[in-house]
Image (spheres, rainbow, N blue to C red):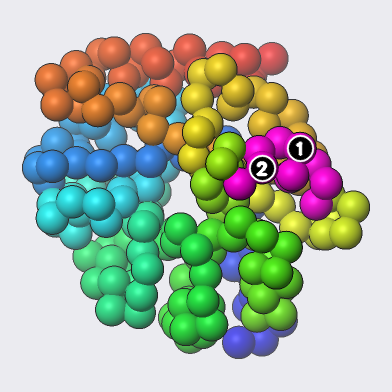
Amino acid sequence: MTTQTTSTISQQIDSLCARNPIIPVIVVEQAEQILPLARALQAGGITILEITLRSDAALDAIALAKNELEGITVGAGTVVNEKQMDQVLAAGAEFIVTPGLSVDLLKSAKSRNVPFLPGVATVSEIIMGLDAGFDRFKFFPAEAAGGLPFIKSLHGPFSQVRFCPTGGIGLHNYLDYLKQPNIMAVGGSWVVPNDAVKQGDWERITEITRSSLVPLQK
């Protein structure tokens, strides 16, 4: 992969996060749930989906969302190996998020030239990612791995790096995270509560989404 291509991937991630500073981390037990769920998020102002591979319905949900929805960027999360990377790309995923990184994952993402957000939790992992040409990372599990104090401490030695913290992010702290200059977005499930998804309470999801975005529009 050329430096220009690596830079392009960073720019693509930056563009996604600039339009959607809150990335919903989604789990669906039935693929069909993704359509009303995505439309509820879209009605509230979120036009990006991270559909995680935490259920058997995930791949079908990715394909359904990609084929049926307009104006929404469909991504895959909780991707942990090359096989899954190929599966989500075949299903139509437009970007990939991993909970951690490995040499194989980094090589696989580079060879596929796909917008890629690898997970990190340590300085050594950040350096590994930088060595591979990546400077945009998911920081996971954010709160358990040190939270805002740790991310703030990284800004000096890694001024070019930007993070999307996920894990323990919610209504109580997402705004504090987004104020930090080396944070480009946050990921969380608070905008897609499990009980609301199971009950089909799409209006509640729209309301949570809209109210979460309002402070960011000031």
User: Which residue is at the front of the view, 80 or 143?
Assistant: 143
User: What's under tag 2, amino acid-wise?
Assistant: Gly
User: Which residue is pictured at 74% across the width and 29% down the height?
Assistant: 179
Residue at image point 30% right, 25% down: 193
Whole-angstrom CA distance, mark 1 to mark 2, is 6 Å
Q: Where does the N terminus fall, quadrant-wise?
A: bottom right
Q: Look at mark 2 in the image and give the residue it sits on.
A: 146
Verify CB contact (< 8 Å) between mark 1 and mark 2.
yes
- Dot 1 surroundings within 10 Å: few (below 14), some, or many (20 or more)? few
Q: Is residue 49 magenta?
A: no
Q: Residue furthest right?
A: 156
Q: State left or right for residue 71 relative to residue 212.
A: left
| Amino acid on which disc 1 is placed | Pro
Q: Quadrant of residue 217?
A: top right
Q: Which residues are magenta?
A: 145-154
Residue 98 vs residue 81: left or right?
Answer: right
In this figure, which residue is indicated by the disc labeled 1?
149
